[in-house]
Every structure is written in C-alpha cells, then in structure tokens.
Image (tube, rainbow, N blue to C red):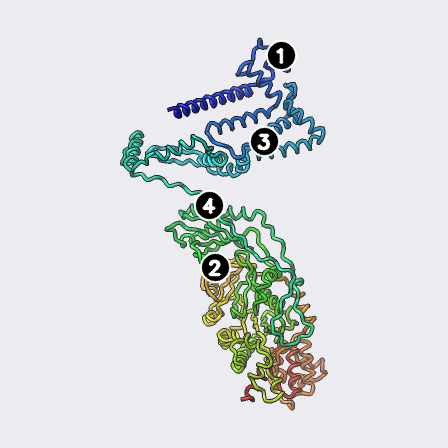
Amino acid sequence: MATKSGKKSGHVWRIILVSLAWAGWLFLTLACVSFRAADPTNNAASPIYYGHSAHVHNWCGPVGADLAFFIFNTFGPGALIGLVMLAAVLIVWTLGRHVHQLVLRLIGGAILVVVVSGMTSLINFGRDLPAGAGGLLGAAIGHFLKREFNYLGAALILALGLVVGLLLAVDEIVLALPGLIARGWKKMPAEQVVDVAGGAAVAVGGGLAGAFKTLAERIFKPSSRPGRDSADRKAAGRQRPKPDAATLGAEAATAAKAQGVDATETSAAPAAPPVAPRAEPIVRKPRLPAIEPMLPFKAPSPQKQDLGNYRLPGLELLDEAEPVVNEGQEAIVREKARVLEACLTSFGIDAKVVAIDTGPVVTLYELELAPGIKSAQVAALHKDIARSLMSPPVRIIDNIPGKSTMGIEAPNTDKEKVRLRELMQLGHDRINKMALPMCLGKDASGNPLIEDLAAMPHLLIAGTTGSGKSVCINSIIMTLLLTQRPDHVKLIMVDPKMVEMQDYKQIPHLMAPIIDDMAKAEGVLEWATEKMDERYQILSEAGVRHIKQFNKLSHEQIVEAFKPATPDEEARLLYHMPYIVIIIDELADLMMTSKEVEGHIVRIAQKARAVGIHLLLATQRPEAAVVTGLIKSNMPGRICFQVRSRIDSRIMLDQSGGELLLGQGDLLMLRPSGGSLLRGQGAFVSDEEIKKVCRFLSDIAQPEYHPELMQLGAPKGLAEAEKDELFDKAVEVILETQRGSVSLLQRHLTIGYSRASRIMEQMRAMGIVGEYKGSQASEVLMTRDQWDAYRDSQRAGALPATEESNISDAVDEAH
C-alpha cells in the first residue's frame, strides 16, 4: 500500500509541476506577444516610467509589461527563439520522451538567440528600447562585429552562425525540409475518403501529416530511463492475461455496436493492408575499368618473320575522348521514369520502374509488371510512350535475360561520342588476348563493346546511308592496324564505291591493291575457297586442326612433319600462316555479278574458320535477294544499324527493332551465341585519324602483294609474234592516261589509224581495256601494279608460286 501511495503522490506532483511550467510559459509568451514599448513600466530603465498608475496595454498587466520589457531589452527578438526552445523542452517533458544529444541542441538554441539578436542590432531598425532593437546582447554583439569586421564581414559571420545554430538545434528538420515540402506539395491536393468500420473519414493532406509524424518519431524517442516505473510496467505486462479469441470478438462487437454497425459486418470487413512506400528506382552506372596509360599492344607470338624496324602505331595518333558532362543526368532519368509510370497508369497498366541503366546514347528503364499484366500490352503502347517522353521512337524489350522484368530503351537528351582511343585504353588487356580484335563501341550500359572476329568467325553489317556502317568498318580496320603486325593479319579490301577505302591503299597489311571491279572481287572469293582447301591440306599434313596450333609449331616440328627431301624443298616450306580478312563494302553489287558468288561466300563461311580466313560483309540493302537464307545461316554474327523498314530488320536480326534505331552509330548486335539483341553506340573514327595511322604505317613498311591475287586481273596472254613492237609503249600510255582511245595512241606514238586500231584490239583481247564504245574512250580494266606483275612473270618465264602452293608441291614430292 505504501508503494502504491508513493507512486500516486509522485504522479500527482509531476502533473502539478508540468501544469505550473506550462502556465508560466503561457504567461511569458502572452506578455511578450502583447509587448508595447509605449507601455509604462515600473523599471527605471524604461523610457516611459510612470509606475503602475498609468494605463497598460499588455495582456498580462504591469507585471507582464515589466517582464516583457526586461526580456526584450536584454535579448531583443532572440527572446522569441528562447520561448520556442522552452516550448519544445516542455513538450518532451510532458510526453515523457527524451531528445537525442540534448546538450548540443541547447547550445544550438543559445547560438540562435545570440545570432538573431545580433542580426537585429546590425540591421538597426527601431529605437524604442534603450539598448536598441537587438537588446543589450544584440548591441554588444553587433558593435563588436561591426568594429572588427565591418558590415559585410559581420553579416557573413552571423549568417554562418545561423546555419550552425539550426543544424545543432533542429538538424533533422533542416535536412528533411526540402523533401518534406516536395511530398506535401505533391500530396496536398489529393483527398482520400477512407472507410473505417462503416464510418467515412476524409483525410486531406495525409502526405504532410505522415511526413511530420515520421519526422517527429526520428527526433523524439520514448523515454527508456531505467527505474521502478519501467520495472513495474514490465511486470504488469507479464501479469496481464492474453485475451482469447472470444474476448477479442466480443470487444470488436461492442465497439461496432457503439458505432451503429452490425457485428457481422464488422467481422466480415477485412483490415486494410498497410501501403508500402514507393521505392525509388536504382540508377546503374557503368563500372568501367581504369583507363590504361599509353601502353603498347603486344605483337602476336610467335613472330617467325623479321619485319625489320616495324612497330605498331601508338594510340597518340588517335583523338582523345571529349569529357562527358553528366550534371543532372540522374535527375533527368528519374523524372522520365516517373513520367513513364504515369503514362502506363493512364492506360490502366500497373507497372513500376525498378532500375535504370544509362548508356552513351540510350537509357534502359526496367519495368516490373503487376500480376496479370502482359508485356504485349506495354509493347502496343510504344508510340504513346515515346510521345509522353517527348523522344524519338522507343524500343520495347519483352524480357530482359535472367530477370523477371521487361525493358524500355529511350534516347538520352545529350549523346556521348564514343572514341576509338578510349575503347582501346579501356579494353587493353582484353585486346591483347584476342587474335583479331574489333573495337565496336559501347553497349547500352556504357561498357566497352569489344569482340574477336576469329571467334565469330564472320561478320555481316547492314545499315542505310548515314547510319554509321562505314564508320564501323573503319573502326574495325583501325583496330587491326593498331594491334596486329602485317605478318599476322593480311587484308583484302573490295571497295566498289572507289572512295571508302582509298586511305588504306599503302598499308603493309594488304595482300592486293584495293579492288573496285566486282568481276575481280568474284575472283578473290574463288581464290579464297581454293586457298582454304590448300590450307586444310597443310594442316592435315602437319597433324593440327587449327591455324593457332600450326603457328605454334617450331621450325623443327614443321620439318619433321613434312620431311622435305632436299634443302630447296625445306626452304619452300611454310612456317607461318597469317590470318586473312576479306572486307567487302557492298555485298549487293557483288551478288549481282554472278550466281557463283553466293556459293563462294557460303563455302568460306562454313569451313574457313579453322584456317584463318574470315569475311566482313557490309550492305546498304539487306534484302532477301542479297542476304539470302544460306548466307544468314552461316553468318550468325550480325550488326544492324538503322534500316529502312521492319522487313529489312527481320532479314538481318530475325526480329524488328532495326527500323527504330537513331542513326549515327546506334546499332543492334546479334552475337553468334544467340540470345537477346545487344544495343550499343558505335565507335567514331575521323578521316584525320585514319590518315595519320596509314601515313605512319606506309612510312615504315610497304605492301607486299600476293602474286596469285595480282594475276586475277592480269592479261589473258598473247603470242609474242602477234604483238606489235610498240605494244608495251602503247600500254604505258593507256595506263598513264587511263583512257583507251585510238586517237590517243596516234598522237603519242605518231602512228597511223590502222596500226593504232590494231594495237587497241590486241589490248582488248588481253583484257587490258574494255569493249568498244563508239566515240567514247574504252574503259581501262588494268592497274599499273597488275601490268608490272605480268611483265615480271613473262620475263621469269613462268608465274611465281605462292607459299601455300610451294608447300603443297613439297608435300606431293614427299609422297
């Protein structure tokens, strides 16, 4: 009994003290709020000192006027800050809670009182009080700061003090205020009608209320002071019996009856589940490896051919990547994610953006659909989504591999230009491990897109004019030139436009001059099929199955495998087999040349991987007559830039999407391993970069053309007795002027019409010039290099044999 009596007495005294404290605070607050400087007071310091006989306007009478005068004359307007802090302390005391870091918050409140008084004195408005508007405290602070720092310095110091005081006193409120205002502004107009136990309650501005409640719970926590009260509460909790189901049901029925609602209706109404807060989508940024310094690329080993002073070009010949400014990018993509969700909601589709992948040109928004929502419903709205995002056509990904989400790719506001130098620095280690590396660009997440042509093993590229197809071919060629020696990779280029690849005409990697005649290009493919068979014979005799294994054989192992009978046969053996990459810029022109072209391409695509012969085909017209079914099935590696129609996209990628690309390097890639399409931005290589690299290579080495390729367009042969004695001079004139004209020969050789006409017919029979065109000059079909090679072979008495044919002859002789 004594214990219970003591508890009750302590509780009563606490209530009395709290009530007295609140009454005193209310008295001071009313006195300060109604303070007038003109009120007479009993204070001798007041400018109006009449005692208590005069009329007082203060709500708390003369005593209130005296207190208010003393407070304002001492602290100035800072006293109001003190009253607010005192109210906060009383609230905490009344609720039985404690404040985190109370001492720091009290110090912050004191700083605010001093700063506000000093600011008021510095501004110096109102002189109704003897000490000025800022009180004695403000006058002292303001006078000191003005004397030592002048007005501007004093204002800066007081502003800094205001920030420090706010952070110490109410840091949670200051830091949460921007988000609080934003949420409140967004949710205030919404009115929700919530049905609670049959009664209607209108909740207006619930967002602000919930936010303030959360903020208060973060600042204040229930008091956890150890003591007898807490022990008693724990004991009472342990002794309190747990209500059974019947008791709970009876209590619910009683409450429902009090509200005028039937008990059966109350029990049948399920409780509303709590609404989980919306999670912000994750914005993923590419985790790029550190950019390597200007490290040289490793030359492929083993190097069995001595190239003298040959060295790989340095990356300093390439332009550096422009710095990317991504200020505000995250805020922009988050805002677009909210717009995307709102657009889908307006069409009755419940979806949420759970992740965002930002790339150089496009951003991928990952959507999580609610149960029962089909991805086809979202795909049907691609035009409406593009309109809501105010962007060009968006691309819908029905299913992101390995995830339960679908994707929407939308263009970025600011596009990033992908430079080849940056890609080669980022992928330095990967490139050194590849036989035929290709730096293609960056994928949709901003990661380097680097592939190995030897593993693909062939690549088909399609795209309209201006889509980035030619730039992609240039970036592939440049990657090979910057990383591979001429004895490791040989290039054969077919350029029907006669302008796309002319910068490469002097590089040492060429096996033949750049071919611009489609008839000769067909001959190149036929030669490649024959060379493929020859190389397979060599691999078979050497006892290996792949070009990599053959190139790893030592000199002794090759001699042991082929067993040459004489030193001449041993000298003719092939000890190194270079890769051969055939690059054809326009497949459509080549396909129209002959029906045998498709057969040659298919044979090479099917069998040439193991012997190191690879195709790189490009076309502007991915039609069914150009990209046939056989070519598609044997070239699984494909890159599609922007195409004209959905049909062209389906021919290239077996699905639509290519028609929605943005152009200027925007691409979709289908890897040989299959799977989903890979979106990316192609690397950019300028003409100046190409010229600098080609000039560097041509200065240190010259191309060594393959004799068999030089004979593809050589003269068909003519008996020496049938040749005119001026035949060679006539050919020189024709090749120099590039005009097949009878009158031209008459003027340069000073001969008659009949003789000049006969020489022209001889050149036409040998394939040096084209058919007769009447008054127009005949087309010159032969180059200077081909004519020189033909004359050299005539002087030698026979055509020179190639390395592969030499070793084939050695194999036959050994057998």
User: What is the CA distance from the residue labelled 4 to the residue labelled 2?
Assistant: 31 Å
Could you classify mark 2 by the number of other residues whose Cα lies within 10 Å: few (under 14), some (14-19), or many (20 or more)?
A: many
Residue plotted at (32% across, 36% down): 242
- Type of the residue with mark 3: Ile
User: What is the CA distance from the residue labelled 1 to the residue labelled 4?
Assistant: 65 Å
Give the residue number, with chain letter if any, for mark 2: 657
User: What is the CA distance from the residue labelled 1 to the residue labelled 2?
Assistant: 90 Å
Question: Going from the N terminus, do you reach mark 3 or mark 4 first?
Answer: 3
Could you classify mark 1 by the number of other residues whose Cα lies within 10 Å: few (under 14), some (14-19), or many (20 or more)?
A: some
As rendered, which of 97 and 122 lies closer to the eye? 97
Give the residue number, with chain letter if any, for mark 1: 49
Give the residue number, with chain letter if any, for mark 3: 107
Which numbered mark, 1 or 3, is in the foreground of this view? 3
The answer to whether residue 194 is seen in the rendering is yes
Question: Going from the N terminus, do you reach mark 1 or mark 4 first?
Answer: 1
Res. 674 mark: none
User: What is the CA distance from the residue labelled 3 to the residue labelled 4?
Assistant: 37 Å
Measured along the vertical axis of the image, is residue 256 above or below residue 647?
above
Question: Going from the N terminus, do you reach mark 4 or mark 2 first?
Answer: 4
